[in-house]
Amino acid sequence: MRVPARRMALAALSALAAITLSGTTAAATVFQQAVSVHHDAHVAGDGTVTLSGTYHCEQASPAGAMQIRATVEQEGGRLSIGAEQPVCDGTERRWVATAPGRWVDVRPGRAVVTAELQEIRFSGLMPKSVTTVAQDRQDVEIRRH
């Protein structure tokens, strides 16, 4: 008995859709997320850099956690800083990221700051993947503080 190719393709597609739909609900990321960069970037006398912005997010998937990463780029140099642990309850909140000055070469002047809201998925205790779910990139003026 011969099965037509069209019927076989339809059956395979239906099986794939059923597997995808049944496996997605428990680990799906809710994409009601946003992050922004404020234009109030500062560098202190000792070189400590402070970047800030706002974010809002929904709870991460059961297999994951959320984090905010800020990156400042200036004259060929680049520095990524982790911000505090975000609270993901849908409320808009402020984030702040600070890097000590002794490892940083950021000066007052023009820079580009990128903020990323990221979901980290774990396999046991080890990170399995990091996905950026929201991003903002702004030209800023870093001021002496």
Image (spheres, rainbow, N blue to C red):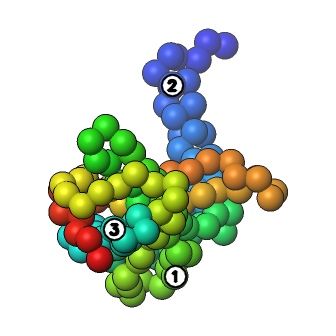
The reply to whether discs 2 and 3 touch (Cβ–Cβ < 8 Å) is: no
Furthest toward the front, the residue is 45
Q: Nearer the viewer, residue 43 or 24?
A: 43
Name the kind of residue labelled 1 in the image: Val
Q: Nearer the viewer, residue 135 or 6?
A: 135
Furthest toward the right, the residue is 124
**Residue 134 rendering spot, x and y as whole percentages:** 37, 60
Name the kind of residue labelled 3 in the image: Val
CA distance for labels 1 and 3: 26 Å
Q: Residue at x 19, y 57 (%)?
A: 109
Q: Nearer the viewer, residue 129 or 54?
A: 54
Residue 36 shows up from this direction: no
Q: Earlier in the sequence, mark 2 or mark 3?
A: 2
Q: Residues within 10 Å of mark 2 (few under 14, many from 20)?
A: few
Residue 65 shows up from this direction: yes
Kindly identify which residue carries mark 3. Answer: 43
**Residue 52 rendering spot, x and y as whole percentages:** 34, 73
Kindly identify which residue carries mark 1. Answer: 87
Kindly identify which residue carries mark 2. Answer: 9
Q: Quadrant of residue 37?
A: bottom left
Q: Residues within 10 Å of mark 1 (few under 14, many from 20)?
A: some
